[in-house]
Image (cartoon, rainbow, N blue to C red):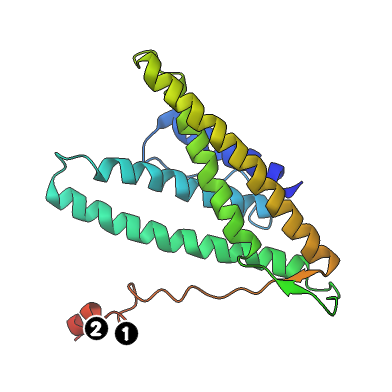
Amino acid sequence: MFSDFAFKIFQESIDTYHIKDDVYQEFSNPYPKDKVEHLLYRKNWIDTVQWHYEDIIRDPEIDPVAALDLKRKIDASNQDRTDLVEYIDGYFLNKYQSVQLKADATINTESPAWAIDRLSILALKIYHMREEVSRKDASPGHIQKCSDKLAILLEQKKDLSTAIDQLLADIEAGDKYMKVYKQMKMYNDDELNPVLRGQKG
């Protein structure tokens, strides 16, 4: 199933990141550029780095200049994340381009890659909740609370994986079709963001 295939790559990315556990470490993709594995690994690496950016920026003692720099990095990371989602959807569009749609085919509320985006974030939640469950310095109450949360996350993983695989099966069978709408984010565009537009020239 594609969801299992993707989740294993997400786990590999997360495990590799945490060897150094440094947002500034060098990125190296172990998969060839022409493979969907390359896109999935890169996608999760972006999510993993951003997860830790979000931890750092919440430090109440953070220097304001450093916080602003980090905010810029988070903005850039969000754009990279969106781009990767669209590349992954491009992979599916190409894969299923010859499928003959049934007359009653319907469109899904989200594309496959946006559902896979949620699976990538879920992989991070599961990893870090497992860390909390394994903490030696935490109270029994904390461990129990995190164990309960981990069980919910694992159930969510099962449900989301099932939904992703069903969606892909429906697209392959012609029961559903997909479209990719470019996100057209406005805040990074100096023609669309009035603040940036005012600074031009």
Residue contact at pointers 2 and 1, CB within 8 angstroms: yes
Q: What residue lies at 61% left-to-right and 37% top-to-bottom?
A: 155
**In terms of secondary structure, where does tag 1 sit?**
loop
Q: Give residue 166's position: percent from left, percent from top.
A: 75, 55
What is the CA distance from the residue labelled 2 to the residue labelled 1?
5 Å
Kind of residue sitting beneath label 2:
Arg
Q: Count all numbered tags in the image, as a single digit.
A: 2
Q: Give residue 175's position: percent from left, percent from top.
A: 81, 69
Q: Is residue 42 visible?
A: no
Mark number displayed over residue 175? none
Kind of residue sitting beneath label 1:
Glu
Q: Which residue is mark 1?
A: 191
The front one of 92 and 114 is 114
Up the image or down, 16 lies above or below 120; here it is above
Q: What residue lies at 45% left-to-right and 76% top-to-bottom?
A: 184
Q: What residue lies at 67% left-to-right and 55% top-to-bottom?
A: 36
The front one of 23 and 179 is 179
Q: Give residue 129's position: percent from left, percent from top.
A: 46, 30
Up the image or down, 11 lies above or below 187; here it is above
Q: Which residue is mark 2?
A: 197
